[in-house]
Image: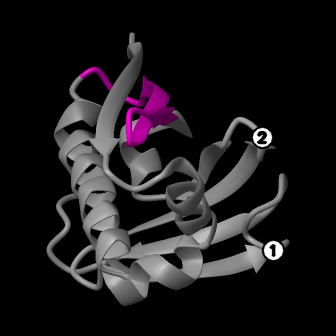
Amino acid sequence: MASIGKLEVDVEVKSNPEKFWNSIRESDKLFPKAFPELYKSIEVLEGDGKDVGSVRLVKFAEGIPLITMSKEKVDVVDEAKKTVGYSVVEGDILTFYKSFKAQLAVEPKDEGSLVKWSCEFEKAKDDAPDPEIIFKAFAVKTFQDLDAYLLKA
């Protein structure tokens, strides 16, 4: 029987929470421009890309292992708590996982922020790759690169 699990990643950044959160909310425009080595494009298919029910098609850059695209539906947004949650509804991820839900929160920490990204998943097969292999380094790199980009801006 395939397993259910959770992965949590915490990344400390120097950017203030409001600036970091706002850039996450504008990721459909910002990420492909700022990080073309990671993101080929992020297209809003339904809604505004930010509100609950919005659907985004994320196409990853060539060279990203195992995953080329992901269609994500926004499940929850809390602007006050700087939290967003989404489900993967289509894409390469679902060849490995029956279900994949992620959540991101930006919290104040000292002079900067603590970015908390987590995912809950159910493997489609027992031999499906561990999400830590696919997502942990990618999430850390994205958040660190975003912080460096914001500090230069």
Which amino acid type is marked by label 1?
Answer: Asp
Tell me residue 53's x, y (percent): 84, 56
Q: Secondary structure at mark 2?
A: loop
Residue wearing tag 1: 48
Horizontal side of residue 29 vs 123, given as left or right? right
Which quarter of the figure is the N terminus placed in? Answer: top left
Farthest-out residue, front: 111
The span picked out in magenta is 108-126
User: Depth check: 82 or 110 in front?
Assistant: 110
Q: Residue at x 24, y 53 (%)?
A: 138
Farthest-out residue, bottom: 33
Horizontal side of residue 106 vs 135, given as left or right? right
Tell me residue 65's x, y (percent): 17, 61
Q: Secondary structure at mark 1?
A: loop
Q: Residue at x 85, y 72 (%)?
A: 47
CA neighbours of label 2 inside 10 A, class few (<14), some (14 to 19), many (20+): few
The correct choice, above or below, for 118 with respect to 92 in the image is: above
Total labels drawn: 2
Q: Residue at x 72, y 65 (%)?
A: 55
Residue wearing tag 2: 80
In the rendered image, residue 138 lying in the magenta stretch gets the answer: no
In the rendered image, residue 117 lying in the magenta stretch gets the answer: yes
